[in-house]
Image (tube, helix red, strand yellow):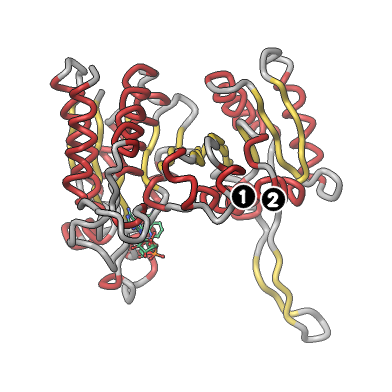
Amino acid sequence: MKIAVLPGDGIGPEIVRQAVKVLERLKADGHAVVIETAPIGGAGYDAAGDPLPEATLALAKSADAVLLGAVGGPKYDTLDRPLRPEQGLLRIRQALGLFTNLRPALVYEELADASSLRPELVAGLDLMILRELTGDIYFGQPRGRRALVNGEREGFDTMKYSESEIRRIAHAGFAIARKRGKKLCSVDKANVLDTSILWREVVNEVAKEYPDVALSHMYVDNAAMQLVRAPKQFDVIVTGNMFGDILSDEASMLTGSIGMLPSASLDAAGKGLYEPIHGSAPDIAGRDVANPLATILSVAMMLRYTFSDEGAASRIEAAVRRVLRDGVRTADIAKPGEATVGTERMGDAVVAALSAHR
Ligand code: NAD
């Protein structure tokens, strides 16, 4: 398991260090883990004048999986756009052909009252959103701004999906539903958009190859409503880039804690880039207060989706659950007045829980 580790900026190095401790624990238990580290984002710019240095991209390409912390920070906000940290992230996703974005929204019983919804609506929530990442209105041509004959300005974008783009994300959706609760909900706007009519047609065609997965369709406006009305009705949601962008952020807030949520972006062969959904949190960087659990849970996703090692993935998730059950809390998930631990001690607690349960 060759893993490229790209800590990035802000809290990135601190939280990634905890995830690396977890990987080292697995290695000590006999897993063939090889870790190589390289700079990305602002750190890439500092090291090589480029948010995605050539050597970093080469390492990422040669690795089986990439673990990323976060990029960005005020120090880099005034750089020209191509030199900005986020460009490093966009370019690496593109260069690795990562078209499936996986965003789980999982609510631990112990943290259910951190949600903005009533605890009984979200306790035990375990939902996975698959967002197509490389097509749709964000990339469709033509796009632009123009002046009309009457002098009025007009902006326009093109929503577009080819059959093959829909087919491959649909396959990914069914495959993941198969590994989970065997329920897939495809979200579109087929009552209004031609792109969505094709989306629905192709998803129905692909469904014939997965008779064991129950497929449903839902319009995006209803899905947005259902996510806050009764989110536990969903197992896996598959949708396009723009709808997924919005719905996955909505779903992440059901959990109430940005420091808990991992993500994965996968290519067709299962190679992936794994990262927490949060950013580099410059406001708390270097203070040993950031929550490393989203990054540690990203390692669990890596083991499940790239290395097909369900045993190790579940072991990490169980260790996190045990630590939460024991009341170990970083500041972001603590109730007022509750004792808290720092980033390092949270990482150590997860490693200790892993060691106690081989
Ligand atoms: P952010 O996610 O970094 O932070 C938002 C809030 O959540 C902050 O108050 C922060 O302290 C808190 N937070 C985030 N992660 C946390 C953790 N693990 N533990 C505890 N608290 C945590 O978003 P932002 O403030 O909008 O952006 C900061 C920088 O991160 C910007 O430069 C932005 O461009 C970048 N960013 C990067 C990514 C990425 O690398 N994927 C994603 C989003 C934003």
Left or right, 219 with respect to 181, comes to right
What SS does tag 1 mark? helix
Q: Residue at x 42, y 41 (%)?
A: 110
Query: Does residue 67 appear in the picture of this structure?
Result: no
The x and y percentages for residue 111 are 43, 45
Furthest-right residue in this view: 191
Q: Residue at x 55, y 25 (%)?
A: 176
Image quarter where the C terminus lies is top left
- Whether tag 2 and tag 1 are in contact, CB under 8 A, the answer is yes
Neighbor class of circle 1 (other Cα within 10 Å; few <14, some 14-19, many 20+) is many
Which amino acid type corresponds to the residue marked 1 in the rendered image? Leu
State ligand 1's quadrant.
bottom left
The x and y percentages for residue 191 are 86, 46
Furthest-bottom residue in this view: 151
Quadrant of residue 172 within the rendered picture: top right
Mark number, residue 247: 1
Q: Residue at x 17, y 38 (%)?
A: 348
Neighbor class of circle 2 (other Cα within 10 Å; few <14, some 14-19, many 20+) is some
Left or right, 80 with respect to 356, comes to right
Above or below 334: residue 2: above
Query: Does residue 195 appear in the picture of this structure?
Result: yes
Quadrant of residue 72 within the rendered picture: bottom left
Give the labeled residue for mark 2: 224
- Disc 2 to disc 1, C-alpha distance: 6 Å
Above or below 177: residue 135: below
Mark number, residue 191: none
Furthest-left residue in this view: 28
Image quarter where the N terminus lies is top left
Q: Residue at x 51, y 49 (%)?
A: 252
Left or right, 272 with respect to 25, comes to right
The x and y percentages for residue 48 are 18, 57
